[in-house]
Amino acid sequence: MHIELQDIRKYFGEVRANDGISLVFEPGRIYGLLGENGAGKSTLMKILSGYQAPTSGTILLDGQPVSFSSPSDALRKGIGMLYQDPQDFPPLLVSENYLLAYDDNLLLDFPKAEEELRGLGERFGFHIDPRVHVETLTLGERQQIELVRLLALGAEFLILDEPTTGISAEQKEILFNTMRRLVNEEQKTIILVSHKLEEVQELCHEVAVLRRGKLMGTKDIPCPNTELVRLMFGQELKRSERVPFQTGETVLRVEDATIQTYRLTVEGIDLELREGEVLGLAGLEGSGQRLLLQACAGLLQPRKGRILLDGKPLEGKRSPFFWTPWLALAFLAFRIVWAAIQFSSGQMSGLEMAGSIAAAALIAGTIWLIGSVLISWTSQTPYHEFQQRGGGYVPAGRLEEGLVAGLTLTEHMVLASPEHTFIIDWNRAREEINRRIQRYNIIGQPDTLVEELSGGNQQRAMLALLNSPLRVLLLEHPTRGLDVTSANWIWELFQQRREEGTAIMFISADLDEILERSDRIAVFSGGVMSRIVQTSETSVEELGHLIGGEQHE
């Protein structure tokens, strides 16, 4: 399949996301598409995959001009895209998600789907169980299922948008081997959208670099990184230096905690996090580090042990009106029994009994409704207590957990505000989110829907919504999808929070980031946390052994 882009332009108001881009893609090759956040990479690929229509320009497929009305239309012509965020339905089974891709089947053939999934999984080295729910899988496993689905639907031209963001090193290796096999053995074409130079150097034959919506040039690989950096940023980048910092008193303490889910149990966790300290959590995805972060945020309750914030446990607050639903049920039951007795003794007709029960049901329903409202107003979950006592939490899933699709940045600002009044001051909210948009360099407006932002800008938005000051900040992959300059800038903001006394605990799949940014490091392997090591006294090699389950002294 030969594809050519001719003078592609895409404008969003005054923003020129793509400004006259022309590229050619030949079969049997892996192409890299590089650029900093907001350079226009994802927009260009969404146009090529049918997700968006260009403002102007032409797409040639084997020499013939084509236009796509939707991603499914592009896929029917052989072009499929693997997006940054999974395009699936987490509550459904793997096999059900797979079958949803077929729009011409009146009767769903589950046995055939399971057989196809297992066969494709074995072919590419994926371990796929068709009968598990997607929500129980890691990001890397969900990605594998989407890739298998694209291949089953006949994709000859594959676009992978930041595919290694948030997946484990093991899953990354499997993905890279699969990409090489598809190109070398099946002559498919792959575009790898990335901002990671090492991935492009390892996999690609050729790379195109975008900056601010324009094509800055193409290079054959291998190519010196310095040339690629100049094309991406217009200058060479200096590695940020680690700033030594004196930590303060203990902010967060975990005492002999056991955290249990149906997939994994993490036992015997003991740790302390001090003011201004950065604690990095390393390990393969699904090894237990995320469970610890969720428990510290009050999203999961430990089966055993305690989690203390500033010396006080996170327990939430029970509503003093917890008894109102039981009162409603008791009243209704009493009236039903009373009406039945009256009817059996002849003191009440059947119609009167029905009316009495209906009236009682109405009163009970009113009590239940009022009680539910009072309970919601006066109760407090451990997570809300965590927030009110100065805690901040940034999850890995942007649109699944961190943001609300369909809401604007201004509406998110209202939701994130620690102060809630009966009447919303929209002007004040717009002014505040506009200040944060400028401070965090978000490419968007106060009225922009969050799903319209690029992945990197969604990440910036979640960080922008954090309140100040914070006692403790819990982060899952804080620089996920961010280029080098953006990642360094984000960590400069975290450094400012450290100086305010904020304690930080974060997860990252990037061992270099863990080593560069952490004061201490804990490694998780199969639900077991290693001893906590000082960053200055460890190495990538030792962390690798710990990730593999070896406990070195």
Image: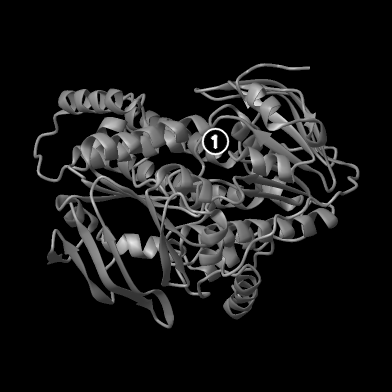
Q: Is residue 470 above or below residue 261?
A: below
Within-10-Å neighbours for mark 1: few <14, some 14–19, many 20+:
some
Which part of the image, by quadrant, shows the C terminus?
top right
Q: Position of residue 455 (x, y in %)?
A: 48, 57
> In the shown orientation, is residue 224 left or right of residue 214?
right
Q: Is residue 495 above or below residue 94?
A: below
Q: Residue 378, can we see it? A: yes
- How many numbered discs? 1
Judge by depth and name the residue closer to the eye, 235 or 416. 235
Residue at (73%, 46%) from the top-left corner? Answer: 517
**What residue did someone put label 1 on?**
326
Q: Residue 254, can we see it? A: no
Q: Position of residue 343 (x, y in %)?
A: 33, 32
Judge by depth and name the residue closer to the eye, 350 or 77. 77
Residue at (18%, 51%) from the top-left corner? Answer: 1
**Three-letter amino acid code of the residue under disc 1:** Trp
Q: Is residue 374 above or below residue 118?
A: below
> In the shown orientation, is residue 228 left or right of residue 385?
left
Judge by depth and name the residue closer to the eye, 464 or 368. 464
Residue at (13%, 63%) from the top-left corner? Answer: 63
Q: Position of residue 368 (x, y in %)?
A: 50, 46
> In the shown orientation, is residue 306 left or right of residue 91?
right
Q: Which SS class for mark 1?
A: helix
